[in-house]
Image: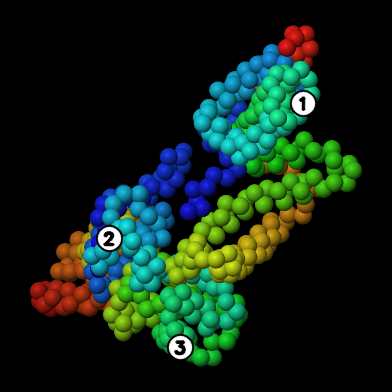
Amino acid sequence: MIRDMTLGQYYPVDSFIHKLDPRTKLFGTMVYIISLFLADGIVGYLISAVFLAIVIRVSKVPFKFIVKGIKPILFLLLFSVIFNLFLTDGDTLVSFWIFRITKQGVRLAFFMALRLVFLIMGSSMMTFTTTPNQLTDGLEKSLHFLNYIRIPVHEIAMMMSIALRFIPILIEETDKIMKAQTARGADFENGSLMQKAKGLVPLLVPLFISAFRRATDLAMAMEARCYRGGEGRTKMKPLKYQRADRLVYLFYAGYLALVVVLSKTVPL
Amino acid sequence: MIELKNVCYIYGENTVMEVGALKNVNLKIGDGQFIGLIGHTGSGKSTLIQHLNGLIRATSGEIYFNGQNIYAEGYKMRDLRSKVGLVFQYPEHQLFEVDVFSDVCFGPKNQGLPEDEVKQRAREAMELVGLDESYDSKSPFELSGGQKRRVAIAGVLAMKPEVLILDEPTAGLDPKGRDEILDQISKLKQERNITVILVSHSMEDVAKYVDRIIVMNHGEVLFDDTPGKVFHHYRELEKVGLAAPQVTYITHALMEKGFPIKAEAITVEEAKQEILKALQETNEKIPNN
């Protein structure tokens, strides 16, 4: 049942992008998002599309997986297109009843849709090619400076990675308990809302107990290995920039410059 | 009577993580049999038993329970689940009620039985696993591991299944707890004359009790025979990460040295008898000086 659900949507293949430092990918996502807001006109978006196409190609993640990621925002997409289409002032193209579509509106709606789709595809490229753990590692290191204003970056990152680590475990546990109760005749699907809610008790009570048990066990195991927070703690696999990462940063700079310059100089 | 025909099951079909968990399994499980289902972790035994009461639907193939196809349109899965009782691994993790007795009542209550029948069945099931009335009002969480497990087993027994399947009922128990549970299951099998399927990765545990062993490996049935005959293949068993009971090794070693011994022994007691008999015969052949 639940086992078939994809989570964290990491797509495990071996590619150049998978091997990059998570910080490079985090920064790249940021650069891409900024570029999307700087881009203006068809040329800017064309370059963004080419950039995205290159990334997708190199990452070896099948295109249909990435398209799937857009589905959840379809509604939002439609919403923004309609609003931009009807509520932008300018030269009237068509008008009927109280609605008026303007030239500027069409242009804005089109680019807004493009921007949203690219945004989602671009940021999902990061989660497709980076495991949640690498991501938290990258975040921890990139946000290290926050330590100076007394934000416990390491602890927050640790909590994040533990939470992420527990998601599949708890899903599996839910699946198991659900099956065990189904075997005892429990019914989680039929009945009125009230009955359904009541029917969840045999699932939730054991699940909570098991979550607490696991949490205590983990805390004990960490303590047994002398874990006491981030201060002075070293890493087994410290993040280190490679030649490839530096090249990719250069690539980012080139891309950003191209988008800015061409958006400003080429009209439309 | 349960019959499996060409049952295949694939985990995560059409994804990168696609795994064939069951490959073309054909089995007939007759009424009143006591079966040991053996295989190491990931051999597909847990997947197989979940097919038997319809918790998992086979990717292809058919399953018949008492002659009826359980995948047929309109077949009542709920009835099947009360006839084929399944006790999961670490069943104590599924307890949720405030007291032991209500937890045992959960199964029969879901069957829609009248209240006094529910209570009577729960009481009976508790007796069967050796828990008297003093446990009724205790919280499941103040019991020991072994006791909790009994409560959970009683919870399934209270549904009066025709087939009882237990997935590793002895996992995590000490030797005493293990023997108690297994003895009780064996006693129960005789008293109620139900079909029992015992899932385990330990030959030693089940050899003493069951009269048929099914060995699973990589989602396929590797052997399906009486314990004695299955243990003859102890070398193949080792190759798939299992081991025959220790006595099998002794009897086979003695046999290879030329002792007139039958290697059918599966328990220490039987092996002892065999060895004594063989020794006697050898002594008779060699005249004493």
Verify CB contact (< 8 Å) between mark 3 and mark 2.
no
- The residue tagged with tag 2: helix, strand or loop? strand
What's under tag 1, amino acid-wise? Thr
Discs 2 and 1 lie in a common subunit: no
What's under tag 3, amino acid-wise? Asp
Chain name for mark 1: A
Mark 1, residue position: A88
Distance (Cα) linking label 2 and label 1? 63 Å
Distance (Cα) linking label 3 and label 1? 72 Å
Up/down of A41 relative to A137, above or below: above
Residue occupying image coordinates x 33% and y 61%: B74
* Along the viewing direction, whichever of A223 and B265 lies nearer the viewer: A223
Residue occupying image coordinates x 58% and y 40%: A9
- The residue tagged with tag 1: helix, strand or loop? loop
Q: Which mark is residue B116?
A: 3
- The residue tagged with tag 3: helix, strand or loop? helix
Residue A70 location (% of width, % of height): 60, 34
What's under tag 2, amino acid-wise? Asn
Mark 2, residue position: B69
Residue occupying image coordinates x 89% and y 41%: A148
Q: Nearer the viewer, mark 2 or mark 1?
A: 1
Of the numbered discs 3 and 2, the one sitting upstream in the chain is: 2
Q: How many marks?
A: 3
Q: Give residue A128's quadrant in the image.
A: top right
Residue B7 location (% of width, % of height): 30, 53
